[in-house]
Image: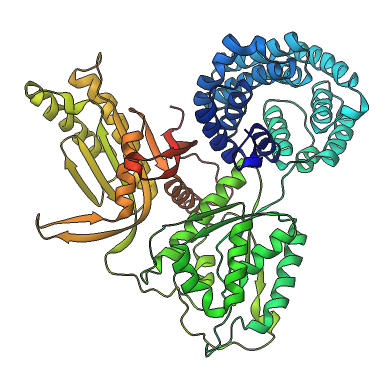
Amino acid sequence: MSSADGEIGLEDLIALKQEGQWFRLQEQAQKLIHQGGVNPAVVHLRGLALANVGAYKEAMDLVGPLVQDEVNSLSATEREEVFGLLGRLHKGLWCRHGERSALEASRHEYLNGFEKTGGYFTGINAASMTWLLGEEQRARDLASRVLNVCRLESPDRVDFWNLATVGEASLLLGDADSAREAYKRAIALCESDANAVSSKRQLILLRENGLDVPDELIELLSAPPIIFFTGHMIDALDRPHRRFPPELENAVREAITSRLNELNGRIGYCSAACGADILFIEALLDLGGEVNIILPFDTDDFIGTCVSYAGEDWVTRFRRCLANAHSVAHATEELYLGDDHLFAFANQLLWGQTSRRAHELLGEIVILAVVDPNGGQGMGGTVATLGNLPRKGRRSIIELPSIRNSTVSAPAPSVADDQQTEGRVIASMLFADVKGFSLLRDESFRLFTDYFGFIANWLKQRAPTPDYVRTVGDGIFTVMRRATDMALYALELQSAVDEANRVVGRVDDPLPMRIALHAAPIYSYHDPISDRPDWFGSHVNRTARLEPITVPGHIYATQQFIALLTHEEDLSRDETDESEFPWISELIGELDLAENFGLQRVFHVMRHGG
């Protein structure tokens, strides 16, 4: 199977690995496994992708059987990769939980790979894990052996990883000068930011555990900044006050390109309205960069609202931008309906995805804006967006007055003025039910009441109070405005169920709960039949369709919820705050929702350290 016939193939997966596109690699490898059975190379690549997005347990469950059942059928290089991946997974668990046994298991897998294949990748990791275990002399002995392996490589096979290994081994041996020279040569050959980030993460870990690592090496391996972009739309011809008139298009384009070059910005997150957004996308694509777009609502509706008024040329350019973007997503695929809160919601999701990407690459966020400071405070507009962003990140502002070189009067209201449709709000939702509860017979009625009575008391004492709760049998539907409150509620609900099973008396046959989380625009209304408040909308249904495919005992969340959660986390602390939230999230992949509701990118949410 190959990409030549329009389907994903092994070579496509390898290309995604080389580009460091871990989310896409995980999803595409998952599809290929489902279509073509168990191919060890594909299984390994999916396991590698899962490891890179932090899903260690899932990766272990996937790759572990390869060592027992398939490892002898693999080449020496493939065998080393499998042992190396298992070593990395145990290392990840050690980083997460701090248990020495996980670090020892990591060293064991890496050392197995080195002894059985002689590969320098597993060798250098075995040496570094040995250093982290406090066995410094043994670590140096291994590092010396690894250096000898690297020196045996022919010059035409020397690449980034060979040179980075020489650098790391030299540091373990106390030779900073040789390490510096090796890393400089490695960076010159580096084809992927992900490679440099991996090496940087390793050096930071070693330095935190006592190894002398010069600051210069950390800076050398730093990734380019991740750009969060916002900017004004181009003025309509009948706009009474000039802000971004069409004749400034070329000047603004030049300013954006110049700023991107100054910043070395090559990864961007933005919307795609006519004017500054499209100019940013075109400039970034011309520089060979990666563009990630989030539209606030339905594509055709967005064109009619934010693009077509400026002319058909802008519509053509808009479609070209979407066709060439690395990713295109929607805050909601529903219609605009005059609801300007959708613009603000899309900006929150853009920030959340920018922040998560910067965290993955150990990179800096730069907020790049094309703005008239007097350009109005419409909800979701550029001025309002800048005012509502977290303190995290460096700002690089291109001011339109300096380009326009004229005094600006107060502008007419933008499309993002506050005209929220009555009843439609941005909210976080939870659907949950107890797996197996429907099979209980009437004689279990007391169990039912005791079980839910215990859960109710637990939540009242420990969890945030929801804005709305509805129960039907064992099903729970909850609405809250803040994603952080909903995450805490979900974790406490999970803990309450675990404790209820222990206290109420089903330890041997527990009743685990499936919990699903989503964030989106939904409608508040008063149900005339029940004479009670309620909520409805397509995204209520989407949340309900995620819950049945959630693994019992776990919490699944959509990408939208995780992005909003990240935005709220960043707002709640400044850039120097290293405090941890009580939850972590790991990508699972794209899952088919129940009842043919389509694909949804899904994350696993769990208690930090749990």
3 left or right of 190 in image: left
The answer, for residue 374, to whether it is visible in the render is no
Q: Quadrant of residue 215?
A: top right
Q: Position of residue 50 (x, y in %)?
A: 56, 31
Which of the two residues, 447 or 30, is positioned nearer the viewer here?
30
The residue shown at (38%, 65%) is: 335
The answer, for residue 42, to whether it is visible in the render is yes
Q: How is the image coloured?
A: rainbow
The residue shown at (72%, 77%) is: 250
Q: Position of residue 239 (x, y in %)?
A: 52, 87
Q: Quadrant of the N terminus?
A: top right
Q: Position of residue 275 (x, y in %)?
A: 60, 73
Q: Is residue 27 above or below residue 358?
A: above
Which of the two residues, 48 or 503, is positioned nearer the viewer here?
48
Q: Quadrant of residue 199?
A: top right
The residue shown at (8%, 26%) is: 445
Total numbered badges shown on the rendered structure: 0
- Residue most toward the left? 443
- Residue most toward the front? 5
Q: Position of residue 205 (x, y in %)?
A: 67, 29
116 left or right of 2 in image: right
Q: Quadrant of the C terminus?
A: top left
Which of the two residues, 102 or 536, is positioned nearer the viewer here?
536
558 left or right of 408 in image: left
The residue shown at (62%, 63%) is: 320
